[in-house]
Image (tube, rainbow, N blue to C red):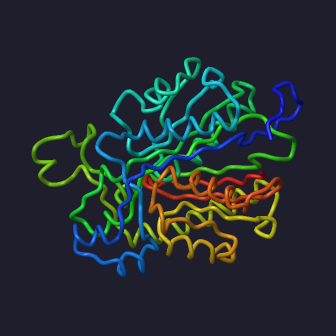
């Protein structure tokens, strides 16, 4: 898929992809022993059966670097060839420096500029949008976009409404110039800061610094208003999808696969109905991974490719919504 840098093509696309999930598995049956819930309750409401869980010695930078190594190897690219690392995450190793810089050290990408994108579940598509602009403008040639999370580290395992939802993992993509007419055909990003209360972690920043009281009140864990998130997320992903398709000059009839953010099976199904996609056209792996936030779309995309559902010329529609509230979409011709 990669073309030489002196090619007249202005198309930007995914040269190679990689994923990594930690080996630890947290099942619904495990959660039954931790919190007042059941496998039936979780499966019916979320579609999730298992999720991967990082151990105490594994940070977001670790899963990100593992996914990135796989992508670079597939691309046949040396670490020093990477010019930019964009890391989308809601679970940074530290407040600062950026986790992307930690990944840079782990990979040996000594020539890269690195920064994090904090757009929650939409972060990977925000990263693709930024990378596409960088390459199309001629500023850079090789950009590494990573979505990585260790969300189980900020889960409140006393709150059954949230602790059953999230899992850990990472997906990475090497972006560069590709054949004319292929690659990223369009993207769309948007946010609404009036909806920050729907999904957030209240404490730990400058608005509410860490104190004994914030720890005792369990304010360093994810808090979510699930019903409101469902309403806004389905509407936002459908809106974003429609705009991306219009920008690409195609319709839903031209889409081969819809790869939504793996938030909740009900959100996925509701969005597919709005877009008039059959579930056969939708990539779903939430049953095995849970909601991995910024990592969910790249993980699902790699799985679809490995299953033979993505081939040369396949048209993908990607869409996400998350805390912020943010939402985003992209149309990609493989």
Q: Is residue 30 left or right of residue 314?
A: left
Q: Position of residue 114 (x, y in %)?
A: 52, 27
| Residue drawn at the location 55% of the way across and 68% of the way down | 235
Q: Residue 256, relative to residue 209: is it above or below?
A: below
Identify the residue at the far top of this view: 111
Number of disc labels: 0
Q: Is residue 333 left or right of residue 79?
A: right
| Residue drawn at the location 80% of the way across and 70% of the way down | 253
- The quadrant of the image that shows the N terminus is top right
Q: Position of residue 304 (x, y in %)?
A: 66, 59
User: Quadrant of residue 281 in the image?
Assistant: bottom right
| Residue drawn at the location 62% of the way across and 64% of the way down | 239
Q: Position of residue 293 (x, y in %)?
A: 47, 54
Q: Is residue 72 left or right of residue 262?
A: right
> 243 or 157, which lies in front?
157
> 265 or 234, which lies in front?
265
Identify the residue at the far front of this view: 23
Q: Position of residue 198 (x, y in %)?
A: 37, 61
User: Quadrant of residue 14 in the image?
Assistant: top right
């Amino acid at each position: 898929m990669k073309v030489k840098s002196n090619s007249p093509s202005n198309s930007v696309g995914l040269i190679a992809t990689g994923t990594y999930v930690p080996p630890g598995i947290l099942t619904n049956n495990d959660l039954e022993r931790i919190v007042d819930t059941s496998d039936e309750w979780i499966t019916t409401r979320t579609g999730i059966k298992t999720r991967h869980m990082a151990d105490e010695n594994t940070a977001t930078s670790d899963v990100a670097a593992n996914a990135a190594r796989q992508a670079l190897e597939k691309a046949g690219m040396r670490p020093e060839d990477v010019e930019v690392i964009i890391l989308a995450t809601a679970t940074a190793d530290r407040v600062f420096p950026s986790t992307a810089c930690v990944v840079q050290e782990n990979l040996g990408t000594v020539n890269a500029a690195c920064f994090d994108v904090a757009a929650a579940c939409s972060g990977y598509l925000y990263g693709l949008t930024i990378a596409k602009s960088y390459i199309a403008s001629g500023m850079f040639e090789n950009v590494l976009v990573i979505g990585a999370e260790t969300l189980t580290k900020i889960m409140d395992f006393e709150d059954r409404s949230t602790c059953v939802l999230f899992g850990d993992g990472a997906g990475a993509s090497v972006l560069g110039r590709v054949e004319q007419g292929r690659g990223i055909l369009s993207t769309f990003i948007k946010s609404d800061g009036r909806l920050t209360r729907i999904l957030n972690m209240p404490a730990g920043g400058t608005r509410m610094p860490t104190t004994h009281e914030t720890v005792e009140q369990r304010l360093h864990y994810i808090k979510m208003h699930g019903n409101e998130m469902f309403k806004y997320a389905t509407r936002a992903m459908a809106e974003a999808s429609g705009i991306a398709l219009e920008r690409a000059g195609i319709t839903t009839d031209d889409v081969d696969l819809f790869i939504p953010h793996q938030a909740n099976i009900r959100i996925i199904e509701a969005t597919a109905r709005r877009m008039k996609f059959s579930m056969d056209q939708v990539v779903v792996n939430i049953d095995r991974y849970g909601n991995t936030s910024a990592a969910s779309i790249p993980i699902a995309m790699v799985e679809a490719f490995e299953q033979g559902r993505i081939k040369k010329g396949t048209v993908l529609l990607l869409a996400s919504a998350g805390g912020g509230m943010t939402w985003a979409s992209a149309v990609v011709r493989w």
